[in-house]
Image: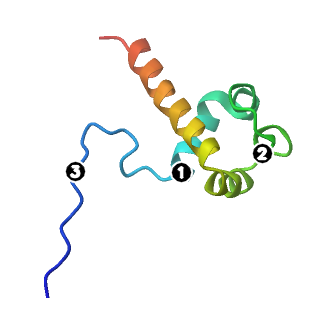
């Protein structure tokens, strides 16, 4: 019985190995709930926001998850640009 091949390593993919919860937590720490609601129009960010309720919505709504992942990548680029050389 052979084992299935391992998926290829993705050392340059910043989303690789990150859970949706970790991404959302970092975004909330950086932008806050108000900032997230301004950047992504979802009620789970503006009306009684919480990590748990937001995760439920993001897991059921692929387009919203893509927006959150895109915002996370944008945040990482901005932080890299702002860092001293």
Please tell me which of labels 1 and 3 falls first in the chain: 3
Q: Which quadrant of the structure image shows residue 79?
A: top left
**Residues at discs 3 and 2 in contact (Cβ within 8 Å):** no
Mark 2 secondary-structure assignment: helix
The residue that appears at 37% across and 52% down in the rendered structure is: 17
Query: From the viewer's perspective, is residue 51 above or below residue 78?
Result: below
C-alpha gap between disc 1 and disc 3: 19 Å
The residue that appears at 73% across and 35% down in the rendered structure is: 33
Mark 1 secondary-structure assignment: helix
Q: Which quadrant of the structure image shows residue 40?
A: top right
Q: Position of residue 10 (x, y in %)?
A: 25, 45
C-alpha gap between disc 2 and disc 1: 15 Å
C-alpha gap between disc 3 and disc 2: 33 Å
Q: What residue would you read off at disc 3?
A: 9
Which quadrant of the figure contains the N terminus?
bottom left
Q: What residue would you read off at disc 2?
A: 44
Return the mark for residue 20: 1
Please tell me which of labels 2 and 1 falls first in the chain: 1
Which quadrant of the figure contains the C terminus?
top left
Report crowding for label 2: few under 14, some 14 to 19, many 20 or more residues within 10 A (C-alpha). Answer: many
The residue that appears at 70% across and 50% down in the rendered structure is: 54
Query: From the viewer's perspective, is residue 48 above or below residue 40?
Result: below
Mark 3 secondary-structure assignment: loop
């Amino acid at each position: 019985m052979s084992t299935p091949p391992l998926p290829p390593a993705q050392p340059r993919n910043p989303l690789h190995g990150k859970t949706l919860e970790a991404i959302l937590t970092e975004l909330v720490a950086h932008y806050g709930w108000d900032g997230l609601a301004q950047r992504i129009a979802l009620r789970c960010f503006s009306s009684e926001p919480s990590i748990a309720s937001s995760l439920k919505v993001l897991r059921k709504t692929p387009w919203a998850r893509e927006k959150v992942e895109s915002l996370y990548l944008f945040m990482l680029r901005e932080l890299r640009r702002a860092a001293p050389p």
